[in-house]
Image (cartoon, helix red, strand yellow):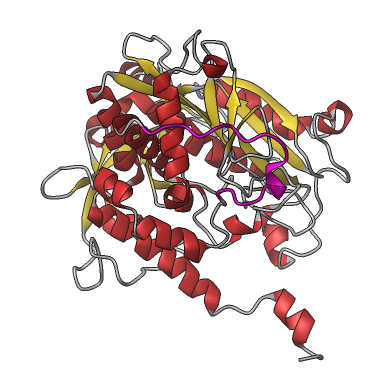
Amino acid sequence: MSSYTLDDLRQDVADGRIDTVLACQVDMQGRLMGKRFQAEFFLESAWKETHSCNYLQATDMEMETVSGYKATSWEKGYGDYTMKPDLSTLRVIPWLEGTALVLCDVLDHHTHEEVAHSPRAILKKQVKRLEDMGMKAYMASELEFFLFDQTYEAAQASGYRNLKLASAYNEDYHIFQTTKEEDVMRAIRKGLQGAGIPVENSKGEASAGQEEINVRYADALTMADRHAIIKNGCKEIAWSKGKAITFLAKWHYNAAGSSSHIHQSLWSLEEKPLFFDHAGHHGMSPLMQNYIAGLLSHASEITYFLAPYINSYKRFMAGTFAPTKAVWSKDNRTAGYRLCGEETKGIRIECRVGGSDLNPYLAFAALLAAGIDGIEKKLELEAPYVGDAYFGKDIREIPRTLRAATKAMTESEMLRAAFGDDVIDHYTRAAEWEQEEYDRRITDWEVARGFERA
């Protein structure tokens, strides 16, 4: 939650510090979509509600009006959704002159009920399930990305070839190299902090030009809101510095993938850590063991929400710190799920499956739904994996393709019960469209390999 209020905004507008308010919904891809309001008009009426075309929750990355959705279509006329600002998310955006931002819930234009397939509504539903069980989830998502020494426009003009990374070598934890990138990274840290997002650190990551930004954990909805703003903010700040950033899960064959590791734990509504038990194995309570068992039991089913694109599956390669096996292990970065903070009240499970291209609301919701199922069914946790999981035999694998992940999601009784049939059908159509679009494209690799020799 932001501590910035509507009264603060009124004062800043009166004093001439703020003249623009961004009212944003989060789309299926996790992007901010909305309008730039003149601040006076926002304070007059738009703080209560505004409107958008309902195709914003049914388009692809290219903003194509994709056929096959039940919720919206040309036949239905692409009507409006109501955008209801959640004023607890209102904040100043320091890197944009005179600008504040608020995130909006997406409501049906006629009933004013939340649109079930909108990402924020999907996560809120799982948060409510936990609250009804007397629990809340705390989460933290670490974001990795690549920084380039050229603009987005220059990268596009080059056909995204011969891009110049900010570093010529692996800069994992490398202070001197990251000093050379401080103009951008310091602006990101300061900007996010100024926007009410508590930053812990930034660091070089495990490839040339790769960065990581870490912010303090929060309740699931607040963390998802922060995640969406962080991604947009990093791009805007890099653009303002004449640089470019990509959150592609795998931007180049020779480079490491970019992840979004998700740390998660459950607490009581009175702030008691429910995952910690002094007497438990590694300090894990029975509840935590049930939760992790749920994650593992439904690992294949929830993978789509952690890896939603064709490119996402290029990241799952042995020896790259991206997992290939959906097993859990104690402080082991080769496993899909890593136990952290053992024997302390900060004990948590880290999901290492997700890439930096995921939608945080959908990923968090899927993880919570799987964990809740494990708790409700009191699923027994398997023994931890020991050793290099990349080369483990006869153990649970992460789906290798979008096709496999889509099938697992579509057939998941757990997800259909947790999210609703219409929601799963909606995202199944999104996954099918991603696959259909890719299947009809010709890649550079195909042409270079077969132009002469085929």
Residue 53 % position (x, y): 28, 57
Q: Quadrant of residue 128?
A: top left
Residue located 20% across and 73% down the image: 75
Whether residue 300 is visible to the viewer of this picture, yes or no, is yes
Residue 231 % position (x, y): 55, 40
Work out which residue is located at the far left of the displayed protein and give it: 111
Residue located 65% across and 53% down the image: 315
* Image quarter in which the N terminus is found: top left
* Image quarter in which the C terminus is found: bottom right
- Report the front residue among 374 and 261: 374
Residue 270 % position (x, y): 33, 8
Residue 47 % position (x, y): 26, 32
Whether residue 360 is visible to the viewer of this picture, yes or no, is no
Q: How many marks?
A: 0
- Report the front residue among 61 and 276: 276
Q: Is residue 385 magenta?
A: yes
- Report the front residue among 100 and 169: 169
Task: Tell me if 141 is positioned left or right of 149 in this view.
Answer: left
Q: Is residue 360 magenta?
A: no
The vertical placement of 151 against 451, above or below, is above
Residue located 60% across and 47% down the image: 325
Task: Tell me if 256 is positioned left or right of 55 in this view.
Answer: right
Residue located 41% across and 58% down the image: 408
Q: Which residues are magenta?
A: 379-396
- Report the front residue among 392 and 353: 392
